[in-house]
Amino acid sequence: QVQLVESGGGLVQAGGSLRLSCAASGSIFSINPMGWFRQGPGKQRELVATVTSGGSTNYGDSVKGRFTISRDAKNTVYLQMNSLKPEDTAVYYCNAFVVGSRGSAIYWGQGTQVTVSS
């Protein structure tokens, strides 16, 4: 069984910064890609950023230039969020395409709340 455990959400004022982390554990051969999605109040889930095992990144248009995604060699992905805006308020979900002992599948974390006050 594969688990994604997120941390780092919270309440921050507009213009501030937060750093999210997501650690994958379990029977994992590889993860590619790994990333973050978010779902704001009354909105559909949307792409925030993804990163491949080779380090290639992809960002949603609304976060380009403000957020940075990175990952380490231990199956942990990070999201550094700077210049936060009230419209960044959402539940942020970690996402990973995992190849493991039971085959391949997409996994989601439980979500972490980010609230940006104006």
Image (spheres, grey):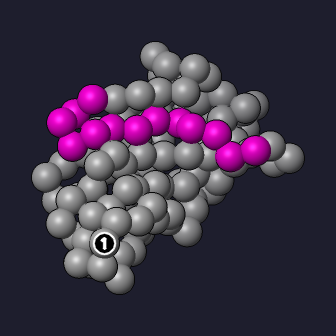
Q: Quadrant of the N terminus?
A: bottom left
Give coordinates of residue 12: x percent, y percent. Answer: 60, 42
Q: Is residue 110 visible?
A: yes
Give coordinates of residue 46: x percent, y percent. Answer: 64, 40
Left or right, 27 with reference to 23: left
Q: Which residue is mark 1?
A: 103
For residue 54: magenta? yes
- For the record, the magenta segment spans 44-56
Give coordinates of residue 88: x percent, y percent. Answer: 66, 35
Q: Secondary structure at mark 1?
A: strand
Residue nearest the observer in this picture, 100 or 72: 100
Neighbours of disc 1 within 10 Å: few (<14), some (14-19), many (20+): few
Q: Outermost residue, right direction? A: 42
Which residue is found at the position 47% from the left and 27% from the top? 59
Which residue is found at the position 81% from the left and 48% from the top? 41
Give coordinates of residue 26: x percent, y percent. Answer: 27, 78
Residue type, label 1? Gly
Q: Quadrant of the C terminus?
A: top right
For residue 110: magenta? no
All told, the count of numbered labels is 1
Left or right, 20 with reference to 29: right
Which residue is found at the position 35% from the left and 76% from the top? 2
> Is 32 rendered above or below residue 116?
below
